[in-house]
Amino acid sequence: MRDYISFIFFSLIVFMILSGCYKYNPVCESCVEYNPTPISLIYPFASFPAPNTPPWNQLTEEGVNLGRHLFYDPILSSDNTVSCASCHKQEYAFGDNTQYSFGINQSLGERNAPTIINIAFHTAFDWDGKSSSVEDQASRPIFNEIELHNNNWSEVINRIKMSELYLDLFCAAFGTSDIDSSHVLKAIAQFERTLISDNSKFDQYLRGEVVLSPEEIRGFNIYSTERGDCFHCHPIGLFTNNMFHNNGIDSQFEDLGRYNVTNNMLDQGAFKSPSLRNIEFSAPYMHDGRFETLEQVIDHYDFGGYDSPTVDPLMKYIGIGLMLTEQEKTDLKAFLLTLSDESFINNADFSNPF
Amino acid sequence: MTFITKNNSIRLLFMFILSFCIYSCDPDEESFSLTIDFKHLVDDVEVVYGNDNLIYNNSSNIYSVRRLLYVLSDITLYFPDNTFLEIDDFIFINSDDSATLRHTLYDLPQQCSGIRFRLGFSSDDNIDNAYINSPYNFHSLMLWPNLFGTDGGTFQGGYHHLKLEGKFLVNSDESYFYNTHTGPINGFDYSILYPTFYFDSTSSISIYMDINKWYNNPFYDLTSFGNGIMDNLDAQELLYQNGLDIFNVQPNA
């Protein structure tokens, strides 16, 4: 009998301990029936590689919707003033129209905000490639002191949990109301992977839907031959080769670029070749936004660039110059403008949901 | 007297199946592999990539090698019993990416005693965007433009065969970049299918490229051709001729 009482007593204690460990989680209705709708990206299979979507972050309508809200919501910044979209504006092909962008407290960035176009298919992220994936890239501005300037994830998550909006959105996207950092990054990455631009005039030309003007065709020939030699770093398709090059804009470097990531001396002054899609909307140009117009960019390459120990051999006209005629420059610009995709910068699915 | 119970029957059946599976595996069925190292020489000295140090050498040009990229396709392996195996995949070599400087071919029936390959792709295989999902960023790095349908129809798409880049000396204090890029133009296929290289059967070989030979026989003057040779028929023809004997294959010690 004594043993029996001891057993009951011991069991009670164990039950109480286990009960004490139980953490209350608010459960929303959508979590009860978690049934997200998968999304398959639609893109030109012939000229785009397969998307780099990790198996652990497959796209769903609910995940993309959550990511879109987070992308546009200043709730991710420490003082609720700045969002991803503050620097990556849809009308500028998810880049910015100023040389540098403002973070919280009017802090000024140090590089031109890169565009976010077709990054589901990219293999390198940021101007210097320091991010290994879209998810990884999405985390960096959150803690950068001149961008969203948070100190840790818990303060970000706490703000999100305080919002009435997000409980249902996270439940629908991930089947849990126990929000953590991985859910935030996965959702933003899902939204960013949907930002596909494949309906420019040049895309339509490749599909046989429109014809290019004689001027645009001449520009295409300059672009795609060594007359202009644009295609080596910006090949047709994604219009980036996902590589890092010193393109001769300086002979000495204030910003060491890719070198900061690799510590390889040859990477000094090298930056990722940006996609030229929607280049009409993404001025100013280069990693430091030094060129305000496409004419200035073309003039740089026509000049040939500045020599340095790390300048890329593809800048083979250094000291010589392309020697393009004014007509050729006009033609080349005309072709570059065929990469504009109005349906991308006006796509309602990509716009601010608030 | 021992009775075989129902449980024992199942155990016996299981052991029988297990034994059958084990004994049906042929212990003599061994697979082999071939590891290929790619080495690039100037005057028998292996090139150190990624700098513009000019190499004073026995060719007609003084040059440096910043980077070298090329494709080997139509690879056929030969075996001592006179059988051969055609490899479906191509091999991409990129001096900027050390992972591409050694390739291993697995699941071979025997040790190899010969290899044949093509520099670049044949016309049949050099198809626009055909290898868009190949590893090592192959597509973006080796894409050959397609101007089909325009007046500049020299290029019909596909991929470069080879990209050799660096600086060359014009005079004592003047040097410029060169881009020796080869590929198909005007419908001509400048890929090179080499005769078979034979060696003592082995699991490890090195394929050597003698870079000087690109410029020696016949003489290819970097100064005269300058840059932008992709659509220069004369340059491509000369490079084709020079490329016929650039490779050597040796078993590794």
Image (cartoon, coloured by chain):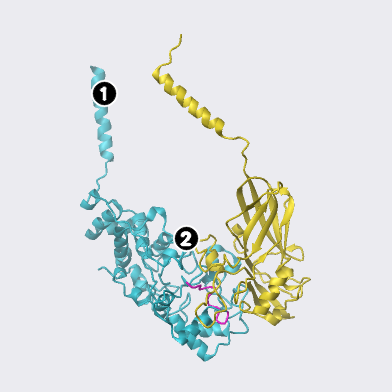
Chain colours: A cyan, B yellow
Residue ranking furthest to the bottom: A326
The magenta stretch spans which residues?
A226-236
Quadrant housing residue B116: bottom right
Residue ranking furthest to the top: B1
Chain designation of label 2: A
Residue nearer the viewer, A189 or A202: A202
Quarter that holds the C terminus of chain A: bottom left
Q: Residue A182: image x %, image y %?
A: 36, 55
Q: Which residue is mark 2?
A: A132
Specify which label sits upstream in the sequence, 1 or 2: 1
Q: Which residue is mark 1?
A: A7
Residue nearer the viewer, A312 or B14: B14
- Secondary structure under tag 1 reads helix
User: What secondary structure is the stretch in magenta mostly built from?
Assistant: loop
Q: Residues within 10 Å of mark 1 (few under 14, many from 20)?
A: few
- Secondary structure under tag 2 reads loop
- Above-or-below relation of A46 to B222: above
Which label sits in the foreground, 1 or 2? 2
The amino acid type found where label 1 is placed reads Phe
